[in-house]
Image (spheres, rainbow, N blue to C red):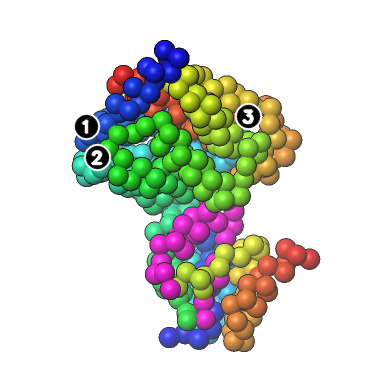
Amino acid sequence: MAKNVGIVIVSHSPDVAKGAADMVRQMVGTNVPLAWCGGNPSGGLGTSVEAIVKALDLAWSDAGVVIMVDMGGAETNSEMAIEMVLEKRRPKIVVCNGPIVEGAVMAATESSGGATLDRVRRAAEELYAR
Amino acid sequence: MRRDGRWRRRTKAMKFDQRTTREMIQTIADTVIGSTDELTELDRAIGDADHGVNLERGFNAVLAKIDSISAQPIDAALSEVGKTLILSVGGASGPLYGKLFATIGQHLTNADEITNERVVAACEQAISVIKTLGRSDVGHKTMLDVLVPSLDQLRMANGVCSLRDVRKRAHEAAVETIPMIARRGRASFLGERSQGHMDPGARSSELIVAAVCDFLETRQ
């Protein structure tokens, strides 16, 4: 079981989500559990609760998981997905209020150093706090 | 007072057997699906032009399993409608409408007969859940700008209201979103430029409220 905080990237566009994930991998390799998803249930622009649930499972870590989202529906659907995972995992999953690409990279670098869920979240969110 | 008595008798007489449940869900789905283009056009003006197709996908998913949905009691049926929308819509409207149906369902548990009071109480809970989930409230140019006044009309009613009044209020409330500046949702990115367009979520809420009123009228 992974010990570093996992990162899930949720965008309306699968290209954006995959691109952000590529940048994270380049920074931290396989040191951080990572998953991404994008597109609505028919494959158009949007997000899918089911896909987010799967991504949360893939990137699961006992240290927790942060979700980076782009806008609106990605955030609401991520909150729905959290309600659908195992109850004991829910308190360890947070949706970050930060920019999806820079936030994911910042969160991943923080996580790769073994930071806690809260510190990883703050790293992703401080880009908006500046 | 005569009208009051009539309303109470009507609502108390409302029983949701399998056929009633099925027809009501079918009416709502048909209404929303039939307005796909209109909703998408409204969303093209101030959003990302997907509200119509998103709800169409959601309600088509509901219709695909309407047999198993309507075989359940009304509370479980509405919860299932909600869950289906959450999983199939693909935009923020999925969780928002999904939670609307699911929460109303949860609060109608063990209701053999659906009374006005129970419906009002269930809708109050549902609206409160939507406010929290959407971090929004009345005046932000959203679905809440139709749902809240429609519920107020129903509650104020306390017997002296007809379904026609509720439907009329829903329509007026949707029109009232036209001059509003969006504070939540994709339209909020436009700021003042969101003025002059009806909110697509307000319109879809009006359609759903109207569909339920239309359906219940045929049952009276």
Q: Is residue B61 visible?
A: no
Kindly identify which numbered label has been placed on residue B154: none
Residue range in magenta is A63-88
Query: On the rendered structure, is B30 left or right of A39?
Result: left
The answer to whether marks 2 and 1 mark residues whose Cβ atoms lie closer than 8 Å is yes
Seen in the picture, residue B166 relative to B126 is either above or below; the reply is: above
Q: Amino acid at mark 3?
A: Thr
In front of the other: A18 or B173: B173
Seen in the picture, residue B217 relative to B42 is either above or below; the reply is: above
The label nearer to you, 2 versus 3, is 2
Q: Secondary structure at mark 2?
A: helix
Q: CA distance from mark 1 to mark 3?
A: 36 Å
Chain ID of residue with mark 2:
B
Seen in the picture, residue A57 relative to B27 is either above or below; the reply is: below
Q: Residue reaching furthest top?
A: B2
Chain ID of residue with mark 3:
B
Task: Locate the N terminus of chain A by quadrant.
Answer: bottom left
Badge 2 is on which residue?
B70
Q: Secondary structure at mark 3?
A: loop
Tell me residue B101's x, y (percent). Answer: 40, 42
Q: Amino acid at mark 1?
A: Arg
Badge 2 or badge 1: first in the primary sequence: 1
At x 51%, y 73%, the residue is: A92
Badge 3 is on which residue?
B177
At x 31%, y 19%, the residue is: B220
Q: Is residue A110 visible?
A: yes
Query: On the rendered structure, is B79 left or right of A21?
Result: left
Crowdedness of circle 1 by 10 Å Cα count: few (<14), some, many (20+)? Answer: few
Badge 1 is on which residue?
B19
Picture quadrant of residue A126: bottom right
